[in-house]
Structures are given as structure tokens and as C-alpha cells.
Image: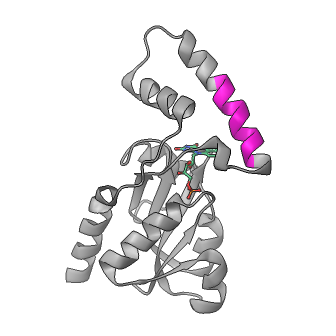
Amino acid sequence: MEAIIYTTNTGSTAQYAKMLAEQTGLSVFSMEDAKSEVEEGSEIIYLGWIMAAQVKGYKTAAKKYKIRAVCAVGMEKTGTRTEEIRKKTFVPAEVPLFTLQGNFNVKKLHGFYRLMMSMMVKMVTKQLVAKTDRTQRENEMLEIMLQGGENVRKENLAEVLDWYKREQML
Ligand SMILES: Cc1cc2nc3c(=O)[nH]c(=O)nc-3n(C[C@H](O)[C@H](O)[C@H](O)COP(=O)(O)O)c2cc1C
């Protein structure tokens, strides 16, 4: 493995990428910096934020680099929605994919993303508030949408680090 490359919007994915770099000793680059710093064809771990169940930047990164694992940073709990995100992003079955919970704050968004998310928050919260039999997942979603969430935690990388250690032993 040669590097960690990430795409972030509000910073959570960058935080995870840097934590992972500290724990693994790998170099870390944003997609932009990687253009000049990481050779095409290099083996990398790719981290991208989730938008509409797709990992941002994955397609571009996959064309240029050999992606050995993907970390998808979203608003939902670490380790959830993995199969849906794999499918929508077209991540091959042999590439490990980990979902990580990041931060969510509409006020940190700008332009189109802010508009899109504000509309989504309004629509989803209206539906969920009206629902009397909400599941636990729906309650968590409602809380995050109404209050925002700061959920970047070092512990969320445990599974990724286990995978990395196993790889190093091979
Ligand atoms: C337009 C938009 C769509 C989003 N769609 C999803 C989604 O489908 N699933 C999800 O878990 N999070 C979704 N999110 C939440 C972000 O993935 C989450 O806030 C993440 O922590 C952002 O990472 P970043 O701080 O690196 O930008 C969406 C955010 C925006 C702005």
C-alpha cells in the first residue's frame, strides 16, 4: 500500500484519513494533491464522503489508482448501509468497503449542497415527525437532522485497522 487518498466536503473524511495515516504510517493526500504526489497505478486506500448513497470521487480515483479498500463517510452509524453503498458506487465485491459515521451540519454546507440538504432535511423530518412507529434508525436520523451531529471518532476506524493489519501480515 502506498498512500491514503481522500475527498471531503465539510472535513470529516479528511479527519478520518489523517487518523488512519497516523495509525498506519501511510502518507495521506487529498485527491487534488494526489494528482502531483501519487503515481498512477499506485495501491491506495480511498476515503470519500457519501452523497445520495454514493462515495464521492470513487469513480475518478478508481480510474487512476489501484484501490485496495474504500472508506465511505456518511451521517449514519459506522458499519451500516455498506451493501447499498457498494452497489450504488459500483465497488467490486473483492474490495473491502467500510462505512464510517462523520459529522453532519447543514450550516457548514454551501451553495447547491446546502440547498439540496435543506430541502431533504425539511422533507424527511416532516415525514418522520408524523410517524408514530419510528424505528431506532429513523429516530437516530431524525435527531441528526434536527440537531446535527459531531460523530468522527477514532474507534470507528477499528475494523479498517484490523483489515490493514491482516493485509500487512500476508
Ligand atoms: C447533498 C448531500 C447528500 C448526502 N447524502 C447522504 C447519504 O445518502 N447517506 C449518508 O449517510 N450521508 C449523506 N450525507 C451526509 C454526509 O455524507 C456526511 O455529513 C459526511 O460526514 C460528510 O463528510 P465530509 O465532512 O467529509 O464532507 C449527505 C450530505 C449532503 C450534503
Extreme right residue here? Answer: 111
Residue 91 appearing in the image: no
Quarter of the rendering occupied by the C terminus? bottom left
Q: Seen in the image, is 142 located left or right of residue 54?
A: left
Dominant SS of magenta comes to helix
Q: Is residue 92 left or right of residue 38?
A: left
Q: Residue at x 58, y 72 (%)?
A: 62
**Up-down relation of residue 116 to residue 42 (above or below):** above
Measuring from the top left, give residue 164's x and y in whole percent: 29, 73
Near-viewer residue (70 or 28): 28
Quarter residue 136 falls in: top left
Q: Image check: 22 left or right of 122?
A: left
Q: Which residues are magenta?
A: 113-123
**Which residue of the protein is positioned furthest toward the left in this rendering?**
169
Give the quadrant of residue 38. bottom right
Is residue 34 within the magenta segment?
no
Name the quarter where the N terminus is drawn: bottom left
* Residue 83 drawn at (x, y percent): 44, 46
Query: In the figure, 26 relative to 121: above or below?
Result: below
In percent of the image, x 47 and y 7: which residue is there?
Answer: 132
Residue in the picture at 33% in, 55% down: 156
Image position of 137 with respect to 97: above or below? above
Work out whether residue 170 or residue 168 is closer to the camera in this orientation and state it.
Answer: 168
Percent coordinates x, y for residue 155 in the rendering: 28, 57
Which x, y percent locates residue 81?
44, 43
Taking the spot 55% from the left edge, 45% from the top edge, the residue there is: 104
Q: How is the image coloured?
A: one colour
- Determine whether, in the image, residue 59 is placed left or right of residue 87: right
Along the line of sight, the residue nearer the viewer: 99 or 97:
99
Q: How many marks?
A: 0
Closer-to-camera residue (154/72): 154
Residue 121 seen in the current view = yes
